[in-house]
Image: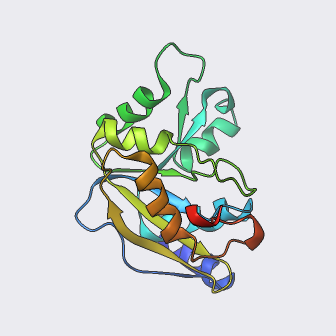
Amino acid sequence: MKKIASWILKLMGWKVDKQTPEGIDKAIIVVGPHTSNWDFIVGRLAFFQYGMPVKILIKKDLFFPPLGWLLKAIGGIPIDRKSKNNFTDQAAEVFNRFDKVYMVFTPEGTRSYNPNWKKGFYYISLKANVPIYIAYMDYERKIGGFMEPLYPSGDVQKDIAYIKEKLSHYKGKYPEKGIRRVEDE
């Protein structure tokens, strides 16, 4: 699958930075900016190229045949939003089920500009005691990759401002919907 993904990305004009989370077997990956449905396709191909076992939390209701088979094949993990179990607890439990796993989030929660990010990824990172890797996609240069890990400090506002600062330098497919620094919101 690595070679096929590499070939498709090359055909689409995308380059993927070779650097991956070295020596880290479990992490949250925050990808941005998220401005288009194409982000999922490009991102999923990049993770195939990396050979990374990524997981994406998807509501349980969508896991019916044949869609459920496809979702599982691409790393989908069913999450019961109606369950009495807390979403954060369910997601953190995923890290206990695998020796090596990377859970992917687009914290904007939408493809439109949103200064009020979903913070679940942050609390899952704290609960599971795993770092957050910042990953970027830049449509202007057609390049994507990883930055350094962030070990949550417990100050959610400060840490999210840091992530926004890092990702604000990259342009999504629709730049006007992209991520802005906290000072510019």
Query: In the rendered view, would you say 103 is above or below 32?
Result: above
How many numbered marks appear?
A: 0
Q: Residue 105, image x and y in percent?
A: 53, 50
Residue at image coords 63%, 45%: 70
Query: In the visual, does 21 lie left or right of 88?
Result: left
Residue nearest the observer in this picture, 78 or 4: 78
Name the residue located 47 percent from the left edge and 54 percent from the top edge.
Answer: 160
Pinpoint residue 79: horizontal percent, then vertical percent.
Answer: 54, 29
Picture quadrant where residue 123 is located:
top left
Q: Where on the picture, by quarter, is residue 178?
A: bottom right
Judge whether 102 appears above or below 171 on screen: above
Which of the colour schemes (rainbow, by chain, secondary structure, one colour) is used? rainbow
Q: Is residue 3 visible?
A: yes
* Depth order, front residue of 48/122: 122
Above or below, comparing residue 38 to residue 123 in the picture: below
Residue 181 place in picture, x, y as percent: 57, 66
Depicted 166 relative to depicted 121: above or below: below
List x then y, in percent, for residue 14.
61, 82
112 or 12: which is nearer to us?
A: 112
* Residue 54 visible here: no
Q: Is residue 41 left or right of residue 119?
A: right
Residue at image position (56%, 61%) is: 182
On screen, residue 1 versus residue 23, left or right, reads right
Q: Residue at x 65, y 61 (%)?
A: 185
Q: In the displayed image of the protein, which residue is found farthest to the top?
A: 84
Outermost front residue: 183
